[in-house]
Image (spheres, rainbow, N blue to C red):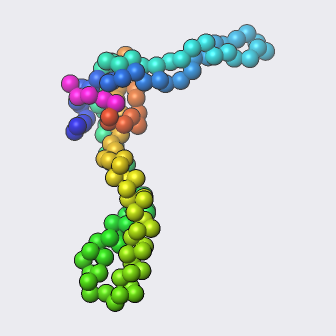
Amino acid sequence: MGLEAGRRVRLTGDLGIAEAVAAPGPGEPAAVVGFLSLGAGLEGTVERVDGELPESEAVREYQRRKALLDDYGHTMPEASRARLAAEVAELEPEWAAHRERGRRVTVRVRLDNGLVLDGAHQDILAAL
């Protein structure tokens, strides 16, 4: 989904925010009396799209080394190619985890009830 500033969106599921705490009398400990959540279907307007979360250093290094191996591996001495292939294999789990997470975009949404949801993952919102 391509979210952009100014677009109307709807919360796709209930979103737990925090525990609700009662203000006790002086000298008494605070007590948890409930849980604050935003209900599915709540609508608002996207104020800002923060873009993709940055790749880790290991992911960038995997991409660099994999490209080197793919493009120039056939011209390398056997020992160098084997060492580079081992380095790529060592970084493979980080790359796989990155691909599994997919494209992660966060947004800031001003909800119609006045609350602001900042740093929210785009997958919890549906464009209207």
Q: Residue at 70% across / 11% down in the picture?
A: 24
**Position of the N terminus by quadrant:** top left
Q: On screen, 78 above or below 68? A: below
Return the residue found at the far top: 25
Query: Main SS of the magenta segment?
Result: strand
Identify the image quadrant of residue 79. Answer: bottom left
Q: Residue at 53% across / 23% down in the picture?
A: 18
Return the residue found at the far right: 27
Please state which of residues 17 and 65 is positioned toward the viewer in this rendering: 65
**Position of the C terminus by quadrant:** top left
Residue 54 visible? The answer is no
Q: Position of residue 56 (x, y in %)?
A: 42, 58
Q: Residue at 42% across / 24% down in the picture?
A: 15
Q: Position of residue 26 (x, y in %)?
A: 76, 12
How many discs mark residues in the rendered view? Answer: 0
Which region shows up in magenta?
Answer: 124-128
Q: Position of residue 94 (x, y in %)?
A: 42, 58
Residue 15 visible? The answer is yes
Please state which of residues 80 and 121 is positioned toward the viewer in this rendering: 80
Q: Position of residue 29 (x, y in %)?
A: 74, 17
Is residue 46 found inside the magenta-colored segment of the image?
Answer: no
Identify the image quadrant of residue 110. Answer: top left
Return the residue found at the far bottom: 77
Q: On screen, 91 above or below 119? A: below
Q: On screen, 10 above or below 67? A: above
Q: Residue at 36% across / 34% down in the picture?
A: 108
Is 51 on the left or on the right of 58, as rendered? left
Please state which of residues 75 and 39 is positioned toward the viewer in this rendering: 75
Is 69 on the left or on the right of 89, as rendered? left
